[in-house]
Image: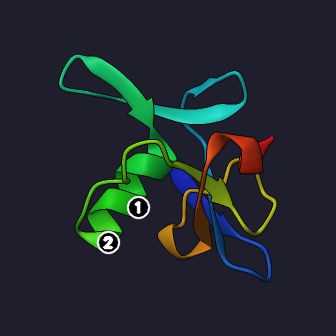
Amino acid sequence: MPYKIEGDLRCWIWTGRTQNGCPVIRLADRNTTARRYHWERGEGKPVPEGMLLSPVCAEELCVRPHHMELMTMPEVQ
């Protein structure tokens, strides 16, 4: 996976493709967010329907599962 570990919070900074500033990865002929990919692998379950992942570390390119918080769309905005 294209990311590097940096900073005091040990963020996993995505160095791969982005779309509208969000880390993305191509899997099975479709794009998904790299945050979702890493969170689902780390948690062992899918992101619940209607929920989004937002990095609590405030680093928009962070994909570290422990830095993600599940939020609804109004909470993210």
| Mark 2 residue element | helix
Q: Residue at x 60, y 42 (%)?
A: 15
Residue shown at 62% from the left, 71% from the top: 67
**Residue 13 image-quadrant placement:** bottom right
State the image coordinates of residue 52 (x, y, percent, origin top left). 55, 47
Residue at numbered disc 2: 43
Classify 41 as above or below 19: below
Residue 4 image point, x, y percent: 59, 59
Q: Badge 2, how many Cα within 10 Å: few under 14, some, many 20+?
A: few
In the depicted structure, whether residue 21 falls above or below residue 51: above
Seen in the picture, residue 64 relative to 60 is either above or below; the reply is below
Please identify the residue farthest to the left as the structure is shown. Answer: 28
Classify residue 67 as left or right of residue 48. Answer: right
* Residue 1 visible within the image: no
Find residue 15 and name its label.
Answer: none
Single out the residue that lies furthest toward the bottom: 8
**34 or 49: nearer the eye?**
49
Disc 1: which residue: 39
Q: Is residue 35 visible?
A: yes
Is 41 positioned to the left or the right of 67 in the image? Answer: left
Q: Residue at x 72, y 30 (%)?
A: 21
Q: What amino acid does circle 1 point to?
A: Trp
Q: How is the image coloured?
A: rainbow
Q: CA distance from mark 2 to mark 1?
A: 6 Å
Residue 1 percent location from the top left of the image: 39, 49
User: Quarter of the image containing the C terminus?
Assistant: top right
Q: Amino acid at mark 2?
A: Glu
Q: Could you say where residue 2 lies in the image, as x and y percent from the top left? A: 48, 46
| Circle count | 2
SS at badge 1: helix
Cβ–Cβ below 8 Å for labels 2 and 1? yes
Neighbor class of circle 1 (other Cα within 10 Å; few <14, some 14-19, many 20+) is many
